[in-house]
Image (cartoon, rainbow, N blue to C red):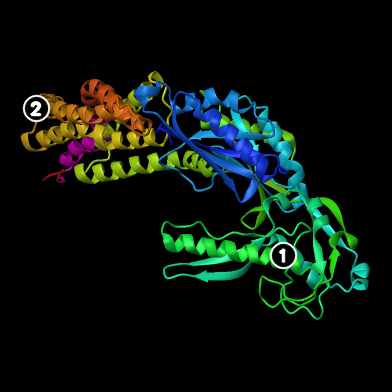
Amino acid sequence: MPEQDNGRIWGGIQADQSISFQLMKRKLAQFVEIVRQDPAVAKVVGFYGGSSSYGYAFAALKPLSDRQASAEEVINRLRPKLEQIPGASLYLSADQDVRVAGQTGNSGYQYTLLGEDTGELCEWAPKVAVALKSLPLLTDVNFDQQQGGLEANLIVDRATAARLGLTVGQIDNTLYDAFGQRQVSVIYKAQNQYRVVMEVAPEFRQSPEILNQIYVSTGGGPVSGTQRTQPLSGTVVAKPPPTRSGSAAASAVQNAGDVARNAASNALANTGRSATSTGSAVSTSKETMVPLSAFTRLGAGNTPIAVYHDNLFPASTISFNLAPGVSLGEATAAVDDRIARLGMPASIHGTFQGTAKAFQQSLANEPFLIGAALLAVYIVLGVLYESYVHPITILSTLPSAGVGAALALIATDTEFNLLALLGVILLIGIVKKNAIMMIDFALDAERSLGLTSREAIYQACLKRFRPIIMTTLAAMFGAVPLAIGFGEGAELRRPLGITIVAGLLVSQLLTLYTTPVIYLYLDHLRSWARRPWRIRQPRLADEGLPGPGE
């Protein structure tokens, strides 16, 4: 598909795998500000979530008359500025109205590696990405492998915990109360309801060292529910959903805040009492608190942030964009050649995905598609004219149309894409009508009026010249708005118009001269092929046998 400029660009943000949400927020703000400062950008918005190392940005460009630069030129202008932000990258692409395939990445085209062994795949995916980054034909090369996320393992000394009278269930409930956003109450109003969630304040979630401030209650009996424990500071936060306008919503939020404050104050006041959880946010019994650090220790490690699969196999996708002036065909050939030289093991298989895969599939099917169309036209014309030869005369007009379309694409520096192919298919149906008009008249004149082939085709050229010119000009002028189209999204329509206009123009200039000549040559060929049968006729008459037609 041709690259469109519809006034929108989007980008994927990929940061260091160990980045925090707070740092990612600052990186996102920096990227958004850089994009906003470009004179061609009207609005920009960004967000991140799910994984702290991933985010997205979307920008709306000013109208073409105001920015005087295409979306691709804006992206190329922003790329050096975005590369100056350390620890994160923003890969921009022009948004497209038509996407051939559903798989997406941080860039426009994807190459996916599939492997049976996850460890082997994780070893080779970075190597392939580095190899593709060295190709001058590609830009914005990145891959989605996320194996280096940081994790903190809380290692529990079970023997010490047992001596202190603690069970694993109590420890688990304590951690979930502090960081798991446990629902402790529901406030019901006439038109809505609000869930009250208890958790530690944001400043107590910034570092694993905060675990040293968590205390676990030994309890006075078996744990029947959740232990309502607080960090050393006694800070608990209630977070109702976002409020709606109106007195009912404001009253509900105020009630939620009252519940949170009461829970926090009672929890602090009741330190030293003991009771099992009763489902209430407020402790009412004496508790014995044991610091978490007394029987646990922290162990740092790495964990996969995301694990991707394709057809049930572990997969890693490498995304890339094309350098200015590079076609997708050149890029895919360069990628295949570079990966073939890496010597990957046979257990790892790489394939193009998304738009690049659809491109390769279309290349494999295009010759069969055009050949099937020509065969169908030949059969229909052969049945119509009861001839094996003259359908070839009609089809002889098609090469001139194809040459005209190709020359026009080269002259306008336009890729031969899917829309250009559709234009060629349309030319097969439009261009041959010139020859059909002449051949149909000439054959009828030969059979009904008894004219020679030369006289018949001469009369056909005279009689059919005006309708041929009229229909050709009508089709050409109908495609002119597509060929000279401008504005947002015109790139999707222009190749179709260029191929139709140029193909009709060149074929019209040539076929008016070539079709009669080909008609006469093929008619002479047909007569020559039948000559042996004509020689036998006098011999049959000499022997007194009836000849043909008697």
Q: Is residue 365 magenta?
A: no
Q: Residues within 10 Å of mark 1 (few under 14, many from 20)?
A: some
Q: Position of residue 178 (x, y in %)?
A: 72, 61
Q: Residue furthest left?
A: 449
Look at 18% across and 36% down and name the residue there. 538
Could you tell me which secondary element the residue under label 1 belongs to? helix
Residue 176's disc number = 1
* The magenta segment: 522-545
Residue carrying label 2: 463
Label 2 residue SS:
helix
Q: Disc 1 to disc 2, how far (Cα)?
A: 91 Å
Viewer-side label of 1, 2: 1
Q: Residue at x 52, y 61 (%)?
A: 253
Residue type (three-letter) at the residue carrying disc 1: Tyr
Give the side of residue 71 with respect to residue 305, left or right.
left
Of 372 and 244, nearer the camera is: 244
- Tag 2: amino acid: Lys
Left or right placement of residue 100 versus residue 492 in this view = right
Q: Nearer the viewer, residue 534 or 87?
A: 87
